Image (cartoon, rainbow, N blue to C red):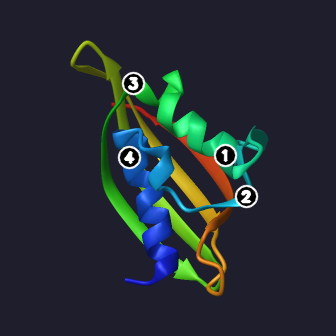
Amino acid sequence: MTAQLEAARTYVAALLSHDGESVPYAPNAVRYEMGLKTGRSGNHLRRSLSRGPQFRVIRAIRDETYRVEGDEVVVDYLIDAGLFGRTLVTAHVHETFVIPADDPRIHRIDAKIRLVVR
């Protein structure tokens, strides 16, 4: 497994584990969700993953696919989210990570999320 792929996989796993410290972010990393800036630095993204309430509702991540395209890792997966042990919604997540091969830390994440109708 390439270091780029490992960095992206670590991020996706941290969505469930809430271990933001394990994710290799560049200091100036940013994240955009549906075009809106949701992360302003590596430290901010780490704190958000570790303590953000928006991640506490994630119950499962499944059907992950990864592909490396130069300095980008493109990831698609499903998230099941809910409360009190019950899944209430499933979302399809498409994320593009900028992870240069010569600096395998996450520099940028662009996320697109859409609800899956059951």
Q: Residue 57 bears which disc, if any?
A: 3
Mark 1 and mark 3: Cα distance apart in space: 22 Å
What residue is shown at x 63% (from left), y 86% (from top)? 70
Mark 1: amino acid = Asn
Mark 2: amino acid = Pro
What residue is shown at x 68% (from left), y 54% (from top)? 110
Q: Are marks 4 and 1 in contact (CB under 8 Å)?
A: no
Q: Quadrant of residue 35?
A: top right
Q: Please determine whether, in this image, residue 13 is positioned above or below residue 38.
A: below
Tell which circle, 2 or 3, labels the residue nearer the N-terminal end.
2
Q: Are marks 4 and 3 in contact (CB under 8 Å)?
A: no
- Determine which residue is flagged by label 2: 27
Mark 4 and mark 1: Cα distance apart in space: 26 Å
- Apparent side of residue 86 relative to residue 41 in the rendered image (left or right): left
Q: Are marks 2 and 4 in contact (CB under 8 Å)?
A: no
Q: Are marks 2 and 1 in contact (CB under 8 Å)?
A: yes
Tell which circle, 2 or 4, labels the residue nearer the N-terminal end.
2
Q: Please determine whether, in this image, residue 59 is positioned above or below residue 101.
A: above
Mark 3: amino acid = Val
Mark 4 and mark 3: Cα distance apart in space: 14 Å
Mark 1, residues whose alpha carbon is within 10 Å: few (<14), some, or many (≥20)? Answer: some
Q: Give the image location of residue 113, x and y in percent.
A: 56, 42
- Determine which residue is flagged by label 4: 78
Q: Give the image location of residue 42, x and y in percent.
A: 68, 51
Q: Give the image location of residue 105, x and y in percent.
A: 61, 69
Q: Are marks 1 and 3 in contact (CB under 8 Å)?
A: no
Q: Please determine whether, in this image, residue 103 is positioned above or below residue 17.
A: below
What residue is shown at x 65% (from left), y 87% (from top)? 102
Q: Quadrant of residue 82?
A: top left
Mark 2 and mark 3: Cα distance apart in space: 27 Å
Q: Give the image location of residue 34, x and y in percent.
A: 70, 42
Tell which circle, 1 or 3, labels the residue nearer the N-terminal end.
1
